[in-house]
Image (spheres, helix red, strand yellow):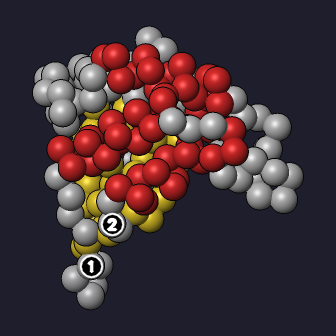
Amino acid sequence: MAKVESFTLDHTKVKAPYVRLITEEHGPQGDTISNYDLRLVQPNAAAIDTAGLHTIEHLLASLLRDRMDGVIDCSPFGCRTGFHLIMWGEHSTTEVAKALKSSLEAIANDITWDDVPGTTIESCGNYKDHSLFSAKEWSKLILSQGISDEPFERHEV
């Protein structure tokens, strides 16, 4: 069975919320794909409810693309503590953390239900499982703790 980097991370040592570069993969044509750990809550201490996480996912899909070039995908962790962000190219964790912070600020302060993409039966596989209220409350809580560009030491952006 292949070794997965995330399963080798000591989840008791990280200090969420943070952005961490998991890996950079280089393709045969020289392209780089980067995978980031956007950890929003402390592992094994909290988990974002599925409706709130689902709404944050839909919003980050657009908001991060508005703030950075090269976003391929932003997908939630099964443990509900954060997201994988997959991107073309190499980006600093500071750049990613600033984009994440700005996106969470928009969710907390500016977004209305009309702004949430993919919430109809035609556009979402579980369209009834969304909560903008929860997404806003979690975003406020995460922002109050500060977003770090380092996983093991607090270095807020």
Q: Residues within 10 Å of mark 2 (few under 14, many from 20)?
A: few
In front here: 104 or 45?
Answer: 104
In front here: 155 or 111?
Answer: 111
Where disc 1 sits, the SS reads loop
Residue type at numbered disc 1: Asp
Question: Residue furthest toward the top?
Answer: 45
Q: Residues within 10 Å of mark 1 (few under 14, many from 20)?
A: few
Q: Is residue 93 left or right of residue 141?
A: left
Query: Of circles 2 and 1, which is in front?
Result: 2
Q: Is residue 115 above or below residue 24?
A: above
Question: Residue furthest toward the bottom?
Answer: 29
Q: Is residue 8 left or right of residue 80?
A: left
- The residue under the point 22% across, 82% down is 30
Estimate the x, y position of residue 20 in percent, counting from the top left. Answer: 25, 41
Where disc 2 sits, the SS reads loop
Question: Residue furthest toward the right?
Answer: 121
Residue 141, located in which quarter of the rendered image?
top left
Estimate the x, y position of residue 98 in percent, counting from the top left. Answer: 26, 42
> What separation in Å lies between label 2 and label 1 (alpha carbons)?
15 Å
Residue type at numbered disc 2: Asp
- The residue under the point 76% across, 35% down is 129
Identify residue for label 1. Answer: 31
- The residue under the point 22% across, 30% down is 148
The label on residue 69 is 2
Q: Is residue 61 left or right of residue 31?
A: right
Estimate the x, y position of residue 56 in percent, counting from the top left. Answer: 55, 38
Query: Which quarter of the figure is the C terminus placed in?
Result: top left
Callout 2 touching callout 1 (CB < 8 Å): no
Q: Is residue 55 visible?
A: yes
The label on residue 142 is none
Q: Earlier in the sequence, mark 2 or mark 1?
A: 1
Estimate the x, y position of residue 81 in percent, counting from the top left. Answer: 47, 28
